Image (cartoon, rainbow, N blue to C red):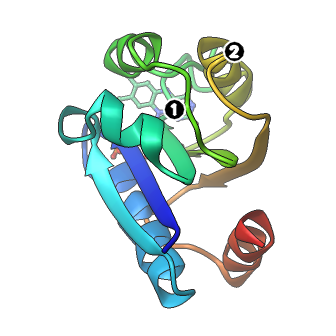
Amino acid sequence: MTIALVVHQSVRGTTKAMAEAIAAHLNSRGLEAKALPLGLASAAEVAAADIVLLGCWTGGLFVFLQHPDGPWKEYVAGLPPLKARKLGLFTTYLLATGSMFTRMKEALAGKGPEVTLLLRSRGPSLSDAQREKLDRFIA
Ligand SMILES: Cc1cc2nc3c(=O)[nH]c(=O)nc-3n(C[C@H](O)[C@H](O)[C@H](O)COP(=O)(O)O)c2cc1C
């Protein structure tokens, strides 16, 4: 069974809901997927998962200087090297994600495989195109 963890940092619930939609889609494809907030995703569990998706809400000055928040950066800094064969990132935002994914990748540098999925959403739900992207990511 392929284990997928969808780990999220959400303040107002949008990114949490997106993470749950991602996990539900992966479960519908036969994976053993669950969405967990940072505080419930132990470093050991994340390190051992086959597929890891890490998400955070987009913070910044709306049109520039976007970045993951402090708790997300601290969490990622504390992760051991990941065994995962697939690593993806996701975020929710209102106007523009700008430097968000670049900053997230910098925080993860050297921890796991190359990031091969970037998903951004203005709301909690996934579009058909995003579901197809997820299908290609796990293939
Ligand atoms: C302090 C603050 C800064 C934000 N900065 C940005 C930004 O730079 N770009 C953007 O598109 N959205 C920005 N947003 C909007 C959030 O990213 C968006 O509402 C997100 O979906 C919130 O996720 P959450 O519900 O999981 O906390 C900001 C929101 C807050 C509260």
Would the CB of label 2 be found within 8 Å of ligand 1?
no
Would the CB of label 1 be found within 8 Å of ligand 1?
yes
Task: Classify mark 1: residues with Cα within 10 Å, few (<14), some (14-19) or many (20+).
Answer: many
* Residue 17 visible in the picture: no
Residue receiving disc 2: 109
Q: Residue at x 46, y 19 (%)?
A: 80
What x and y, as percent, mark residue 127? Answer: 64, 77
Q: Which sits in the foreground, 43 or 104?
A: 43
Kind of residue indicated by mark 2 = Ala
What whole-number distance in Å separates the C-alpha atoms at marks 1 and 2? 19 Å
The disc at residue 43 is none
| Secondary structure of the residue carrying numbered label 2 | loop
What x and y, as percent, mark residue 139? Answer: 78, 73
Picture quadrant where residue 48 is located:
top left
Of labels 1 and 2, earlier in sequence is: 1
Kind of residue indicated by mark 1 = Thr
19 is higher (above) or lower (below) than 84: below
* Residue 38 visible in the picture: yes
Q: Residue at x 58, y 26 (%)?
A: 62
- Looking at the rendering, the quadrant in which ligand 1 lies is top left
Q: How many numbered circles does the render carry?
A: 2
| Secondary structure of the residue carrying numbered label 1 | loop
Q: Residue at x 74, y 51 (%)?
A: 117
What x and y, as percent, mark residue 123? Answer: 48, 61
The disc at residue 58 is 1
What x and y, as percent, mark residue 47? Answer: 45, 35
Q: Which sits in the foreground, 2 or 20?
A: 2
Q: Which sits in the foreground, 77 or 9?
A: 77
Q: Is residue 47 left or right of residue 112?
A: left
Q: Is residue 51 left or right of residue 112?
A: left
